[in-house]
Image (cartoon, rainbow, N blue to C red):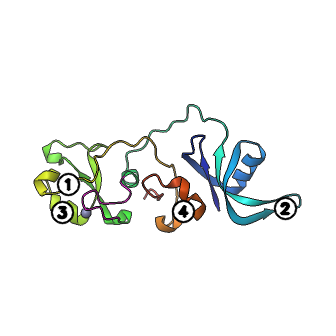
Amino acid sequence: MHTLVLDQGYQPHRIISWQRAVCMIFDGKVEVVEEYDEDIRSVTICIKMPAVVRLLRNIVGRKRAIKFSRINVAMRDDFKCQYCGVRHRLRGLTYDHVVPKSQGGKTNWENIVMACYGCNEKKSNRAPHQAGLRLRRPPVKPKWLPIVAFHVDPASSIPEAWANWVYWHGRLESDP
Ligand SMILES: [Zn+2]
């Protein structure tokens, strides 16, 4: 069981063990936002296992750059093909250069979107309008992403209690 830590602004910050979360609660570093149904019992205490906690103090100087990676682009794009809008697992999606490399398109946040293999093939080495395709939304560099390292199936990896807090416009998934 893990606990999701939110920063002061209720953005996902990191994931820690529930034991560590309990220590932070008792140290007054975090407040409980959501609980699991499970009780934690010891001789002296009985509390609900913390599912989501929020840091009470601001994190200074710890802004992380968002890595430009397949998984992060997929999360930004909500695991949806940006042309047909169909959601896929990560393995059902591929990187697509909006402006093809052959036309000078760069490999960066502003020019890469996730596409299903069908749309990617249809688009081929063309710009979207040349292939009769239209982008669902313009690709931009996201301001933040949840930092996670899960090695489980994405669809089942998010505890129910986290749902309100981790859906940015993507689900959490492991970096393959
Ligand atoms: Zn598609």
Callout 1 secondary element = loop
For image coordinates 50% across by 49% down, the residue present is 146
What is the quadrant of the C terminus in the image? bottom left
Q: Say which of 71 and 26 sits in front.
A: 26
- Is there CB contact under 8 Å for labels 4 and 1? no
Distance between the Cα atoms at labels 3 and 1? 14 Å
Which residue is farthest left?
Answer: 130
Location of mark 2 (residue): 42
Q: Residue at x 28, y 56 (%)?
A: 82
Residue 167 forms part of the magenta stretch: no
Q: Earlier in the sequence, mark 2 or mark 1?
A: 2
Q: Residues within 10 Å of mark 3 (few under 14, many from 20)?
A: few
Label 3: element kind = helix
Residue situated in front as seen by the camera: 85 or 69: 85
Element class at badge 4? loop
Say what amino acid the circle numbered 4 marks.
Ile
The answer to whether 62 appears left or right of 80 in the picture is right
Callout 3 amino acid: Glu
The magenta span reads: 77-87
Query: Is 85 placed above or below 69 here?
Result: below
Sequence order check, earlier mark of 2 and 3: 2
The amino acid type, in three-letter code, at marker 1 is: Arg
Q: Mark 4 sits on what residue?
A: 158
Give whichever of discs 4 and 1 has the lower sequence position: 1
**Pointer 1 residue:** 134
Position in image of residue 50 (x %, y %): 69, 57
Residue 2 versus residue 97 in the image, above or below: below
What residue is drawn where x is 16% and y is 62%?
122
Q: Residue at x 54, y 59 (%)?
A: 163
Mark 2 to mark 3 CA distance (whole Å): 58 Å
- The amino acid type of the residue labelled 2 equals Ser
Depth check: give the residue in front, 115 or 31. Answer: 31
